[in-house]
Image: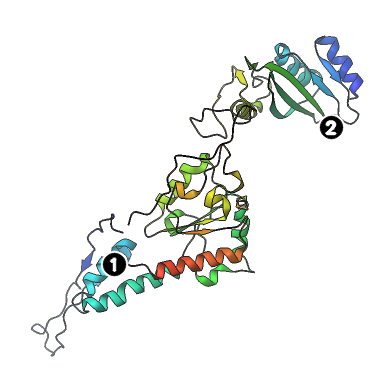
Amino acid sequence: MGRLSAAKPVLTTPAAAPTAEDSPLPMATEPAVPFIEIETLRAREFLPAAKEALGSLLSEQAQGKLIRPMFNWAGRNSLFPLHWGLACCAIEFAAAFGARWDAERFGVVPRSSPRQCDLLIVNGTVTWKVAHKLITLYEQMPEPKWVIAMGNCATGGGPFRTAYSVVPGVDKLVPVDVYIAGCPPRPEALLDGILRLEQLIKERKE
Amino acid sequence: MEGEELSRRLVGKFPAVVVEPFRETAGRVRFPPEILLDLFREMRDGLGFDHLGQVGAIDWVEEREVFYTLWSDREKQYVFLSTRVPASAPHLESLTPVFSSANWHEREAWELVGIEFDHHPDLRPLLTPTGYEFHPLLRSFQLHEPEGLEVKVRDV
Ligand code: SF4
């Protein structure tokens, strides 16, 4: 998050906050809590905005205990992977979202547009011909985002490591958070990788 | 069409071709590269082989072989045709004026085995990335461990 200087959060105060003076009835004098226009915020602007909004109410320590864990909790329970199948591992990827393994019970729902995703599961052999498209898809995903390299091909080129056309590991193109071994890994292994990624997100600090 | 009939009708027009009859398919035809366009026009218009299924190439070290598969919808038969060009000058006329489906097959044969198809309308790499300089299905091509690539890390 460091390199992305967060844009100024949009904060507004309620337009006509009634005060004790112009009201005939006595009112409790509360500080006007600014509310956050959630729809206009991007994910990476949420944390600074929440800090600013709650800064006057919570101590520094309480903020650290509340805001980031809440943000991580929301993020890790709604991981949306990109629905993108590359090679044979995509069959196991599809099986993991079918009725038998049902990855949706972890809040993992494949989406068809990179704009709606925060998880890129690279499930198959990445050739040099498709490499720049993979980078484009990764860059189209909004922050914060994660990458899982599924299978030996995505991890290190697999059986095609020395071939002329295959990228020897997708970590040469984009940063990878979780590697899953196997050719192909079983759907349980994919679910295990997703749960490990959730653990990583849980421990995420600034 | 029996193999003998194919042989009779082709060799009468093109004395240079060699027809080996197959039992179940119509046959295998070997021809010199100069008569390529005339031979395929005759196959399409005269003999009714109206579908080009595949164009491929093999590296035989001194020579490179280009082979074609034709299908006749009327006879329900395949015929295989092949020709050889020297590896020192692997030039062959493009088949796209006769069968436009040869376009992508020839691009593939060019980038993988290095057959230069003259007068091809659009000889760009099809499978290998843009700017790739080798013909990887040649026997002289060496596989090698990848090198000079860095692992990307997230800059936090
Ligand atoms: S790791 Fe194995 S199963 Fe997965 S894409 Fe590569 S070859 Fe296919």
**Do the residues bearing badges 1 and 2 touch, measured as CB atoms within 8 Å?**
no
User: Could you tell me how many numbered marks the image carries?
Assistant: 2
Left or right position of B47 against B103:
right
Name the front one of labels 1 and 2.
Answer: 1
**Residue toward you, B92 or A205:** A205
Q: Nearer the viewer, residue A202 or B45?
A: A202
Q: Residue at x 20, y 79 (%)?
A: A57
Residue B107 is tagged as none
**Label 1, residues with CA under 10 Å away: few <14, some 14-19, many ≥20:** some
Residue A97 visible here: no
Residue A21: x and y in percent read 8, 83
What residue lies at 61% left-to-right and 24% top-to-bottom? B114
Q: Do circles 1 and 2 both sit on a common chain?
A: no
Q: Report the quarter where the C terminus of chain B lies.
A: bottom left
Name the residue beneath numbered marker 1: A47
- Frontmost residue, A143 versus A173: A173
Its colouring scheme is rainbow
Given the image, on which type of amino acid does mark 2 rest?
Lys
Crowd around label 2: few <14 · some 14–19 · many ≥20 (10 Å): few
Residue A12 drawn at (x, y percent): 20, 68
User: Which residue shows up at 48% across the image and 39% down it?
Assistant: B147
Residue A174 position within the rendered picture, expressed as x and y whole percent measured from the top left? 43, 50
Examine the rendered structure and indicate whether residue B89 appears above or below residue A1.
above
Image spot of residue B32 (x, y percent): 74, 13
Residue beneath disc 2: B76
Q: Which chain does tag 1 point to?
A: A
> Which quarter shows the N terminus of chain B?
top right
